[in-house]
Image (cartoon, rainbow, N blue to C red):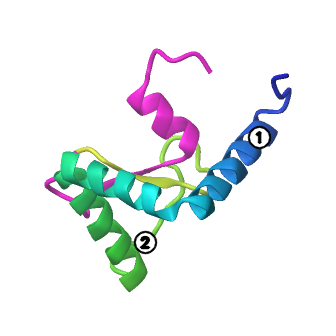
Amino acid sequence: MPYKDPEMHRACARESARRARQRDPERFREIQRRWRRKHPKKAAAYAKTHWAIAKGMLVRAPCEACGHEKAEAHHDDYDKPLEVRWLCKLHHMEHHYPNRDS
């Protein structure tokens, strides 16, 4: 039976993924390794962005579209890892999948 509340569905999916990672952590490490090999520029940009945030060189900002405080870093160019746009989850998905039904 589908959830009527999408947030409840997301919470259950996150919990299910967390349990799966705990049951077989090596499988998930291998999935991550394969992804990093397949997408080296993305992986490097994510790592540099995470490092810059941790060191205080890059400061998280609200979503540039709606002002929501919880925003994600979006890279328009992976060769410039510290040049990011801050978008909330909704606007980040809309940016990548503009024709997707919400």
Which mark lies nearer to you, 2 or 1? 1
Q: Position of residue 6 (x, y in %)?
A: 76, 33
Label 2 CA crowd tier, 10 Å (few <14, some 14–19, many 20+): few
Residue range (magenta): 77-102
Residue nearest the observer in this picture, 61 or 99: 99
Residue 20 higher or lower than 92, as above or below: below
- Residue drawn 25% across and 52% down? 42
Furthest residue toward bottom: 55
The three-letter amino acid code for the residue at tag 1 is Glu
Q: Quadrant of the C terminus?
A: top right
Q: Quadrant of the N terminus?
A: top right
Report if residue 14 lies within the magenta region: no
Q: Position of residue 11 (x, y in %)?
A: 75, 47
The three-letter amino acid code for the residue at tag 2 is Val
Secondary structure beneath disc 1?
Answer: helix
Q: Are marks 2 and 1 in contact (CB under 8 Å)?
A: no
Furthest residue toward left: 79
Report if residue 91 lies within the magenta region: yes
Q: Which residue is mark 2?
A: 59
Residue 100 higher or lower than 23, as above or below: above
Label 1 CA crowd tier, 10 Å (few <14, some 14–19, many 20+): few
Residue nearest the observer in this picture, 33 or 72: 33
Q: Position of residue 76 (x, y in %)?
A: 26, 44
Q: Is residue 90 left or right of residue 60?
A: right
The disc label shown at residue 7, or none: 1
